[in-house]
Image (cartoon, helix red, strand yellow):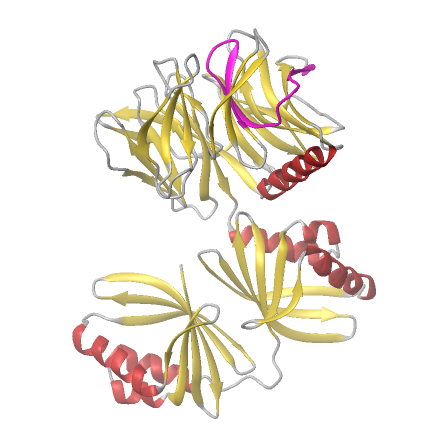
Amino acid sequence: MMKNYLTTILLLSTFFLQAQADTEVHLLYLEKEGNSFKFSKSINISNNEGYDNQPSFYDNNTVLFSSNLDGQTEIGKYTILDGKFCHITNTDFGSEYSPTKIPGQEKISAIRLDKDGKQLLYSYDFTTGNSKALINDLVIGYHTWATETKLASFVLGKESSLVVSNLATNKNKTVDTNIGRSLHKIPNSALVSYISKKNRKWEIRSLDVETGKTRSIINTIPNVEDMCWTPDGTIFMAKDKTIYQLNPNEGLNWKVLKSFDSPEINNISRLAINQVGTYMAFVAEVSPERIVQKQLDTYNNRDIDGFMSTFFEDIRLYSFPDSLTTEGAEATRKRYQEFFEKTPNLHSEIKNRIVIGNVVIDEEFITANDRRYSIVAIYEVENGKIIRARFIRPKEENVDPAPVLQQNEAYNKQDLIKFLNAYDENVILYNYPNLKTSTGKNTLSNLYGNIFKNVKGIKVKIDKRIIIGDIIIDEEHHDFNGGNYSAVSVYKIKNGKIISVTNIQE
């Protein structure tokens, strides 16, 4: 029994640690317009460093969410009418997650994870913040209320379970397994929705908490588990920077509702709509550039804790492209802590920065005691943290960019002979970081010969260029067959010829 308990605690700790990326809660005004919806510009209502997540509505004008407070996760409250935010709780011995209004009471339910690993569902007085355990025999990760005394929960264990709890009788009943975290009351019904992950195609299903019966509603957007309902029965789901809509009573196809172009809205998740359908709250990761900038600032301040907070536990550091030098947070901490302690005169200055999708490329000039040198760092950001970093440290003087200039000019003129003349006979093309896609000039000739012959209106414009040793990195804007896209090309030069090109695209 003790072994099972300890295993569960380990699962819980890993569960929440992985979840706590640097995220913000955004709010926008929502208006029904025919069969679709119109959005106002979103505002950041958390505006707080660290983990701000899991929004819900206490009433039509009050948003609840989990919010970072001095390293703890507490219950936060944002009042829409006056635009004010405050923390409802300040719990020294634990963190609160998934705050939710309890029907018929001026109370909130939330999961509390104590520092000793104990995790239970509690009720909190909305005014005082005083708490009391609601369910003592389930380890709940997420929940939603079906009635004033019955709730459906995502319960942790060897696999996630959907459990209906009756607080009046203190009975729990498992009705399904392998579910997602998104649980919602279905508008104008006594049903609850949940995400089933049992099949390759995930499903949104309904649950009758009285009978335990479930039925399929619609398939989710592939591999997306966060959703919400509008009052008229439309479902919203989000993927990357786009929100989609589908009304199961009107059709079976997901439609794009809104795509965001703000660099501060990435990987949208955790959607919530108020009861009258006038406001929507959602969670978005901060921009990869902001994460990398925080990493740089803490590096310059030799703040090892702040520095490490920007990395995943399984962070990997490489010499470009794929020579592993450091693996894991523990080894990374040890490496940089020793460096920080030995280097009081430490500063990194950004000379150039290129951002493409979740990849941030920094050309840095570093001062370390009496040494001054240049490097390029290529950071990959996922779920609000740096998961991989690849470093280019030059071993020779910067090369002449002539072969890259030549192939750019020839590309724009669709001059295949001059284009190929810039490349080595054994040139290799890669997709970032090291997926080989083409070898040899003959293959290159066939590829670009077909492009130059069959595609009109092609042109590349260089927005930024970094030269470091034998490497040239170009940020490129491409016009191609009536469309356009951005890309980054990493060229390696030897003896005046391009010997490899690594392509990075969004």
Q: With respect to residue 418, does 230 lie above or below?
A: above
Residue at 60% over, 26% down? 76
Residue at 51% over, 49% down? 287
Q: Whole-percent x and y of residue 380? A: 53, 59
> In this rendering, would 31 be left or right of 148?
left
Residue at 18% over, 71% down? 456
Task: Give the magenta part as a residue range.
Answer: 129-154
Q: Whole-percent x and y of residue 267? A: 45, 44
Residue 374 location, quadrant: bottom right
> In this rendering, would 13 be left or right of 243?
right
Residue 140 in magenta stretch: yes
Residue 64 location, quadrant: top right
> In this rendering, would 298 be left or right of 418?
right
Between 346 and 55, the one nearer to me in the picture: 55
Q: Magenta: predominant secondary structure element?
A: strand
Residue 483 in magenta stretch: no
Q: Whole-percent x and y of residue 119? A: 67, 28
Residue at 52% over, 60% down? 360
Can you say which quadrant of the picture contains the N terminus? top right
Q: Whole-percent x and y of residue 59? A: 48, 15
Can you say which quadrant of the picture contains the C terminus? bottom left
